[in-house]
Amino acid sequence: MIESVQIRHRGAVDFDSHYDNLCAMQDSCPLPAVKAHLQQNVLDINGDRVRVTDWQPILNTLKINKSLEFVGIRSYYTPPNDENEKKAIIEKRKMPSIRSKEITYRLCKALKECLSVTPALSCLELQGLPLRERDLTTLIKGLAKNSTLSHVSFEFCRIGDNGLDILCKGIKNSTTVNSINFTGCSLTAKGADSLAKVIKHQAMKRHNEAWRDSLRYRRPDLDRMSGIRRITINNNPMLGDQGATYLAEALKDDLWLKALDMQGCGISTTGAKSLLDVLKYNTTVVVLDVRRNPLIDREVVHAIMEQLMINSNGQDTEYKWLKAEEPLDPSRSKLSAKKRRTKTLNSSFGRKTTIKVSANTCRDWRTKSTGNVNVARKMNPISSEEIKSGPGRPWRTAARANRFRGFPPEHVPGISNLYENSEELNLSTQDQSSIIITKENDEDTLRELEN
């Protein structure tokens, strides 16, 4: 066998060595962020920190790879505003290479080749990338050939309704994808109509499969049938009541979709009532998240939660609820950083202590200083290994050591965003009602739900 062919075959199952080889050929240094989690078969990188010349060995290795199980390419760059022209010109010069048309197109081509040959890849997450229609058209060719992918996420990619329509053409015929995430993708009611068509298309295929099983004197096993089980479309405020109506119509004849997340989608009481009517005879949906939609009446939300508890028989399911909090939009990261303030306190040792206090700081741990000033700060628990690693190690340093460079403190490479943002809930009356009910009249409402 030719030596180059042998290298290619070895590189398909060994990302680390092949990446090192390609970097040596172009006389560049391998990036530690790329190699950080390859032992766990995870490639999760911040594209903002990768230069143009460093993309070529990454993409050429990804193109032929057959061993990675998780691939995540993320961008947290904030585009400049056009108000100040001089500042906008300077910011555009500093724009990372991942924002360019050429790099995103080459990335989608590499992912298409990887999806076509890999027997292991199960999770693909693209976050905050400016994907164009040409990129998405290339990517769905790989999705159509893949038979291992189970989770696809395009969180904050701003693909719009046209981009979603392109992706739906490749996802609707997939037999392995069971969860999709289109959080913050600038979707409207037209995008909800595209998702509704995917639900109807897969429902028709499952009905045909169940009918074939019934002809063979077998009872159809609905849980083992393939198809999408969770759809997440949070933070799309232009979806509105019309989009909720489209999805409600699709759920009338569907018996397989388990979870539908619609936080912050601009739904009012009219759209929530259409979803509530569907839940009365669709007993398979166990998660229908309409929180952070302030136009919905509290009574309607309570009725939805009660019906969901009936569907799940009061038991905890594998489909967890997502945290109801402000979205981690990369475009708003700089705005949140400006809200932080610094307080300087005089400690008992005669030195000045600087503590950063954010607007949403938890009040789990409090300290009193000389002036009777209470400062709230979050204190992360320190493991015994961290304490043994160095004498007199401050807790702030220990907490900072656990973070992964290039990512927000909440993110852990190799873990899906849906899993990270999920919260452990017991489907009991008190727990579910406490999510939506405000602190006012909390006890009275709980009593009503218990009765």
Image (cartoon, grey):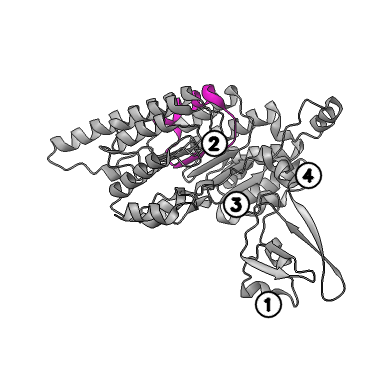
- Asked whether the beta carbons under mark 2 and mark 1 sit within 8 Å of each other, the answer is no
Q: Disc 3 marks which amino acid?
A: Pro
Residue 173, image quadrant: top left
The mark that comes first in sequence, 2 or 3, is 2
Query: Which label belongs to residue 28?
Result: 4
Q: Which of marks 2 and 1 is in front?
A: 2
Q: Is mark 4 on a helix, strand or loop?
A: loop
Is 394 left, or right, of 385 in this rendering?
right
The mark that comes first in sequence, 3 or 4, is 4
Which residue is at a point 58% across and 38% down the rendered structure image?
126
Q: Distance between the residues labelled 3 and 4?
A: 24 Å
Query: Which label belongs to residue 409?
Result: none
Q: How far apart are marks 1 and 3 (CA)?
A: 25 Å
- Asked whether the beta carbons under mark 4 and mark 1 sit within 8 Å of each other, the answer is no
Q: Disc 4 marks which amino acid?
A: Ser
Which span is picked out in magenta? 145-173
The mark that comes first in sequence, 2 or 1, is 2
Residue 333 is situated, as x and y percent measured from the top left of the image, at 69, 43
| Quarter of the C terminus within the rendering | bottom left
**Which residue bears the numbered disc 3?**
413
**Which residue bears the numbered disc 1?**
388
The mark that comes first in sequence, 1 or 3, is 1
